Amino acid sequence: MKSAVAALILLATQAPAQSITTLPAGELDWARTPEGVAFAQLHGDRFAGEYMAMVTLPAGLVSPAHRKGADMFGVVVSGAMTHVPKGADPMGGAALGPGAFYLIPADLPHISSCISQSDCVTFLYQPGAFDFRPEGG
């Protein structure tokens, strides 16, 4: 019995310490694309696989129709956005404001828009690498 207890104590002392990760908003490291969209990486590497990021879309931005290779889960933090399937009126979708959730399935051609007068900020999670595959037409 003593050896089992000793083994448990040894394992507990060798276990990696757990910690809470925090990142104040003022310390986010934003990278802007040529189109003006900004990404602040929170977890993972968006070009290599699963990731979480804050994303800012400029006010008035309407994306071209495009697809993603992985489902995209989002929560709007500020501004108002629409996400509609290709062929729908980008301004005709449901206006999603702060706190709204959206899921864009992988391979669904869609258009994302920031319809507010101010920039749109959203939290994104994708279980696969980020990609932006333009959808012709």
Image: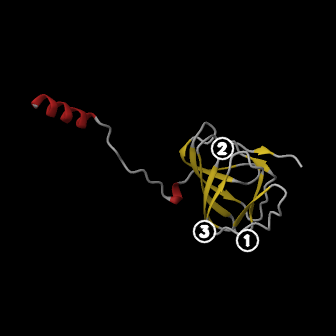
Q: Quadrant of residue 133?
A: top right
> Compared to 3, does 91 lie above or below?
below
Q: Secondary structure at mark 3?
A: loop
> Compared to 115, does 34 lie above or below?
above
Q: Quadrant of residue 63?
A: bottom right
Q: Nearer the viewer, mark 1 or mark 3?
A: 3
Q: Nearer the viewer, mark 2 or mark 3?
A: 2
Lower position in the chain sequence, tag 1 or tag 3? 3
| Direction from residue 11 to residue 99 in the image, left or right | right
The N terminus lies in quadrant: top left
Three-letter amino acid code at disc 3?
Pro
Q: CA distance from mark 1 to mark 2?
A: 30 Å
Which residue was labeled with disc 2?
70
Q: CA distance from mark 2 to mark 3?
A: 24 Å
From the top left corner, tell me how far across and down residue 18 is, in percent: 34, 45
Q: Nearer the viewer, mark 1 or mark 2?
A: 2
Which residue was labeled with disc 3?
98
Classed neighbour count for the residue bearing mark 1: other residues with Cα under 10 Å, few (<14), some (14–19), many (≥20): few
Classed neighbour count for the residue bearing mark 2: other residues with Cα under 10 Å, few (<14), some (14–19), many (≥20): many
In percent of the image, x 47 and y 54: which residue is there? 23
In percent of the image, x 13 and y 28: which residue is there? 3
* Contact? badges 2 and 3 (CB < 8 Å): no
Three-letter amino acid code at disc 1?
Gln
| Direction from residue 64 to residue 19 in the image, left or right | left
Farthest residue toward the right?
A: 137
In percent of the image, x 72 and y 48: which residue is there? 33
In percent of the image, x 58 and y 44: which residue is there? 127
From the top left corner, tell me how far across and down residue 134 is, in percent: 80, 45
Which residue was labeled with disc 1?
117
Counting the numbered discs, the total is 3
Lower position in the chain sequence, tag 1 or tag 2? 2
Q: Using the image, tell me which numbered label, if any, was put on residue 59.
A: none
